[in-house]
Amino acid sequence: MLFEKYQSVIEDAQHANQLRGFYSHYPEHPKAYGEDAMAKGEDAFKKLLNHPFEALLQEEATGWEGEEISPYTLENLGVTYPILPVGTLVSQSIRGAGQWSDTPVQERAALLVESLEKIKERFFEIAYATMHTTGQSFMMSFQASGPHAADRALEAIAMGFQELTRFPAEVNWTKPMGKSAITLEKTFRPMPKGTGVVIGCSTFPVWNSMPGIYADLVTGNPVIVKPHPGAVLPIAIVVAEIQKTLRENGQDPHLCQLAADTAGHLIAKKLCNHPLVKLIDYTGGTAFGNYVESIPDKTVFTEKAGVNSVILDSVENMRDVAENLAFSACLYSGQMCTAPQNFFIPASGVGTPQNNLSYEEVVAQIKEAVAALVSNPKMGAGTLGAIQNEKTLERAKAVTQEQTGIALQGDAVPNAAFTHARTFSPTLLETDAASHELYEQEFFGPVIVLIRTKDTAESVRLAKQMAEKHGAITCAAYTTRPDVMAVITREMNAVFAPVTFNLTGYIWVNQHAAFSDFHVTGGNPAGNAGFTDPMFVVNRFVWVGNRIMKTGV
């Protein structure tokens, strides 16, 4: 039995979920996977280029399409994917759903872990596919779409396993009735809600999709994966491995399907509105996220846009803080839902153990830290990566043309390895607290807004207001005063925004760790669900209790 093979893995993951300490089943360092793994992965990726992606085990394609362009080479990958009508995808998804639902949760969970082990063998191939569809650097692509995504999937499996086995499968229920008793045999079945759809984004096509995929599958639901047309290949590899694992273990591979589409013929709305689709996971912009949430009779899990804040009050060392924040804001050119955008700085400056730094000095240090990182020949291009699509680049350039308070001008950054890479360094805008119309919007991409406030109290009030009105996934705060820390925690948590205090060195506010950090709280407009709390899995099934009268007992 597969469960015997992977029982310890599932139990360790369950234990990690409960303790919330550091745990990783899949090492994040490339060297852990063998000396030649990177070269083999790159070679496997190159062999996929300019060919139909024929590894998927799904039937009745009406055509083949693909339009992915590498942000590094600006060349089309030439990979095409099977195009299937929405009705076909949904009807095929339910073909093996009964058998999958009836499969004991122990076997379902073990089979899914087995699929992760197969995906692990393709981490480097997935990394290159991620790099050349999203613009992430190779290292970020490897970690985010490989071990980190697999850990998030395992986290969902473990959480699902725990919730599905919370109650006994059967019990004899006896009620004393004086000289007699009534006995009922009761059974409790977790019943899956139905076909799920996971709608991916163009910047993190694997990391953001795998939790929903595995949460659907572990709870007994089939799933249709609808990637962004500009970032299909990384998640297509994942789906192919899941399908192979399903077939090898006697399950219908159509329990997990890829629903590729094109920019000119999008199918997300049709999928979401199909009457047999019951579950929807969505990552992306707020407008479509709000639409998905409004569809009646669906269970929806969303991660949308937010406006993430930095509150500066007092620090131990401003240079260390500036370098940490510069890296956080520059990482992947700000194309992360966790990236800090609004930096609230008191007009009186920021306190340090030695003296009080003026507002101007704080701004200067942040500006210097960003400029130093961007111009660093060893770190700059690798940290920034590339801009995923032309529209993001156009928005970043428009900011430099339309705004007057520019503290630092963004510009293209040379990449020695990829001379045609689509790049742009962060633009630093400087404004005051009254300019709500500027900093209330999300500048997805390389834009930082430095906001002069009256004092820390106003900074906290504005950051709270942004989170409550527009959503926030992260909030970074810097203070050496315990009373101020308590106030920031109370105010930001009141609008369901988590706070990270006083980060310096090699850890950044952008990072959310599997088995420990809840990614998105689900309590503000940034999204209605979080990776991976119990609600992320229990809303995908319902408990049904049956009773049989026992006689002669």
Image (cartoon, rainbow, N blue to C red):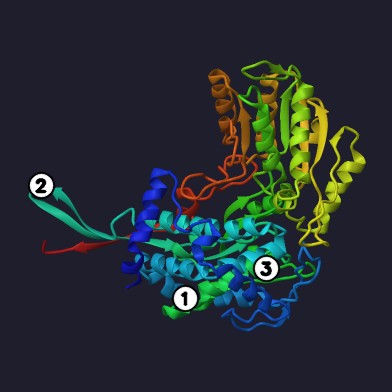
Type of amino acid under label 3: Val
> How far apart are the alpha carbons under marks 1 and 2?
53 Å
Q: Front-most of 357 and 445?
A: 357
Residues packed near mark 1 inside 10 Å, few (<14), some (14 to 19) or many (20 plus): many
Q: Quadrant of residue 356?
A: top right
Q: Front-most of 483 and 45?
A: 45
Mark 3 lies on residue: 232
Residue ID at (68%, 30%): 319
Q: Quadrant of residue 203?
A: bottom right
Is residue 211 among what the camera can see?
no
Type of amino acid under label 2: Gly
- In the image, 435: left or right of 113? right
Which badge, 3 or 1, comes first in the chain's sequence?
3
Q: Secondary structure at mark 3?
A: loop
Q: Kindly indicate whether the residue at mark 2 contacts the one at mark 1 (C-beta within 8 angstroms).
A: no
Type of amino acid under label 1: Leu
Mark 2 lies on residue: 178
- In the image, 521: left or right of 352? left
Residues packed near mark 3 inside 10 Å, few (<14), some (14 to 19) or many (20 plus): many
Q: Quadrant of the C terminus?
A: bottom left
Q: Position of residue 70 (x, y in %)?
A: 76, 66
Q: Position of residue 397 (x, y in %)?
A: 87, 48
Taking 198 as reference, is 447 above or below it?
above
> How far apart are the alpha carbons under marks 2 and 3?
67 Å
Q: Front-most of 52 and 60?
A: 52
Residue ID at (67%, 20%): 456
Mark 1 lies on residue: 246
Nearer to us: label 1 or label 2:
1
